[in-house]
């Protein structure tokens, strides 16, 4: 039976037969991108294949609707306008810290992060911004490495007339020291679609 915990419309934790007496690997599935909620709600929704696969492998999956996602008004949604890779990354890291404190049966020593597209960008950036060795590994699929070189149709919508410094701050290739202690699986083709 699929088990899930929902707290304050912010996080969702999925797992199979997870109790306080068992331990589990722990993952954070991340999109974290602008305007796209992870659909955290009172209702169970259709799950993505990677969530179902992870749960089948006894991995607890945490899904977070941080600042920048829809459903909580303009102030919440526009919190990172002109500064992609800031508050939404902070929200993911802070929430996972709180989840680990609240649910000690989740194994914080085997924490990993997964994301695709903006989630791939977020997963790499979370490793860079979190304390060293916080994540055991990261799976980053088709990440945006630098928004200066990403499609203008998307970037201008969320970065506006941001300075070069704001773009540089979101470049995932500039601070990679935490990857000395965190393994990275980088998956990318020629098209992010």
Image (spheres, rainbow, N blue to C red):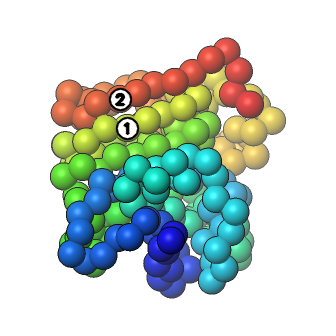
Q: Which label number is shown at residue 138?
A: 1
- The quadrant in which residue 44 appears is bottom right
Measured as percent of width and height from the top left, residue 30 is found at 51, 51
Q: On the image, numbered disc 2 is attached to which residue?
A: 184
Measured as percent of width and height from the top left, residue 193 is found at 74, 31
Furthest residue in direction front, as rendered: 1
Q: Secondary structure at mark 1?
A: strand
Please count the marks in the image: 2
Q: Residue at x 68, y 69 (%)?
A: 45
Q: Are marks 2 and 1 in contact (CB under 8 Å)?
A: yes
Apparent side of residue 167 relative to residue 112 in the rendered image (left or right): right
Measured as percent of width and height from the top left, residue 128 is found at 32, 39
Apparent side of residue 97 relative to residue 73 in the rendered image (left or right): left
Apparent side of residue 76 relative to residue 64 in the rendered image (left or right): right
Between disc 2 and disc 1, whose residue precedes?
1
Q: Residue at x 69, y 58 (%)?
A: 36
The residues bearing labels 2 and 1 have C-alpha atoms spaced at a distance of: 5 Å
Of residues 16 and 43, the one drawn nearer to the viewer in this rendering: 16
Measured as percent of width and height from the top left, residue 51 is found at 54, 53
- The quadrant in which residue 90 appears is bottom left
Of residues 79 and 97, the one drawn nearer to the viewer in this rendering: 97
Furthest residue in direction right, as rendered: 153
Q: Is residue 34 visible?
A: yes
Of residues 63 and 82, the one drawn nearer to the viewer in this rendering: 63
């Amino acid at each position: 039976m699929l088990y899930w915990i929902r707290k304050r419309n912010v996080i969702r934790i999925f797992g199979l037969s997870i109790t306080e007496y068992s331990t589990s690997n722990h993952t954070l599935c991340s999109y974290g991108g602008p305007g796209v909620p992870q659909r955290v709600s009172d209702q169970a929704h259709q799950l993505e294949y990677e969530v179902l696969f992870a749960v089948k492998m006894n991995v607890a999956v945490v899904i977070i609707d941080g600042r920048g996602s829809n459903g909580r008004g303009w102030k919440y949604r526009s919190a990172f306008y002109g500064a992609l890779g800031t508050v939404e990354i902070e929200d993911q890291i802070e929430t996972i810290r709180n989840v680990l404190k609240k649910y000690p049966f989740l194994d914080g020593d085997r924490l990993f992060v997964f994301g695709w597209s903006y989630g791939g960008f977020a997963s790499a950036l979370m490793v860079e911004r979190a304390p060293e060795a916080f994540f055991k590994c990261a799976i980053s699929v088709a990440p945006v490495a630098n928004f200066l070189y990403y499609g203008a149709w998307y970037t201008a919508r969320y970065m506006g007339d941001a300075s070069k410094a704001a773009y540089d701050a979101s470049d995932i290739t500039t601070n990679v020291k935490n990857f000395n202690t965190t393994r990275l699986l980088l998956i990318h083709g020629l098209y992010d679609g």
